[in-house]
Image: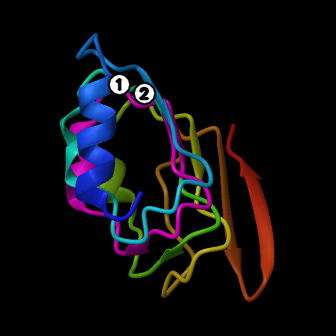
Amino acid sequence: IESAEQLSTIVLNDIEDPTVEILSLTGVSIDSSIPDFIYTLSDLSVLVLKDCSLSGTINSSISNLHSLSVLDLCDNRLTGTVTADLFDDNRSLRYLGLARNSFDTVPVVPSRIAVYAYSIIGRTDYQSVQ
């Protein structure tokens, strides 16, 4: 896969049912920001983009994925600041993996998220919020 556009063509052409609920691309070298087509998958409940060479910031369009319960973005090169309001519209999110990225600060997430992972200065912390 040489570009995010090629990835979207492959994924969308191979999907027979447009109501994708699980998308796991662990280790696929996307080498760009999170592809825009992912934000259109409104029935997505699990999104795993671990170790995909993602860069840039997390687009606010992530809040359009209202059914998302698992979001794993660990082991990428994501930057910027992650604030709780980024996930305000998503009441289903229970696991958020953000470890081993390059965020400017420790990500702030809503307390309703049961488990989240983040890293700072080479250390990964797992928080369980009850």
Please tell me which residue is depicted at 55% across the width and 83% down the height of the picture.
102
Dot 1 amino acid type:
Ser
Residue 20 falls in image quadrant: top left
Picture mark count:
2
Distance (Cα) linking label 2 and label 1: 6 Å
Rate crowding at label 2 as few (under 14), some (14 to 19) or many (20 or more) other CA atoms within 10 Å. Answer: some
Tell me whether the residue at label 2 lies in contact with that at label 1, contact meaning CB atoms closer than 8 angstroms: yes
> How far across and how far down the image is residue 108, in percent?
49, 65
On screen, residue 124 above or below 60: below
Image-based side of 22 in relation to 113, left or right? left
Taking the view exactly as shown, the residue that stands out farthest to the front is: 2
For residue 89, say whether it is visible: no
Please tell me which residue is depicted at 30% across the width and 59% down the height of the picture.
4
> How far across and how far down the image is residue 42, in percent?
23, 27
Please tell me which residue is depicted at 47% across the width and 35% down the height of the picture.
93
Q: Is residue 71 magenta?
A: yes
Q: The magenta stretch spans which residues?
A: 47-72
Residue at disc 1, secondary structure:
loop
> Mark 2 or mark 1, which is nearer to you?
1
On screen, residue 81 above or below 88: below
**Which residue is tagged 1?**
67
For residue 33, say whether it is visible: yes
User: In the image shown, does 27 or 108 lie closer to the viewer?
Assistant: 27
Q: Quadrant of the N terminus?
A: bottom left
> How far across and how far down the image is residue 14, in percent?
32, 24
Residue at disc 2, secondary structure:
loop
Disc 2 or 1, which lies upstream in sequence?
Answer: 1
Please tell me which residue is depicted at 69% across the width and 37% down the height of the picture.
130
Image-based side of 47 in relation to 40, left or right? right
Rate crowding at label 1 as few (under 14), some (14 to 19) or many (20 or more) other CA atoms within 10 Å. Answer: some
**Which residue is tagged 2?**
92
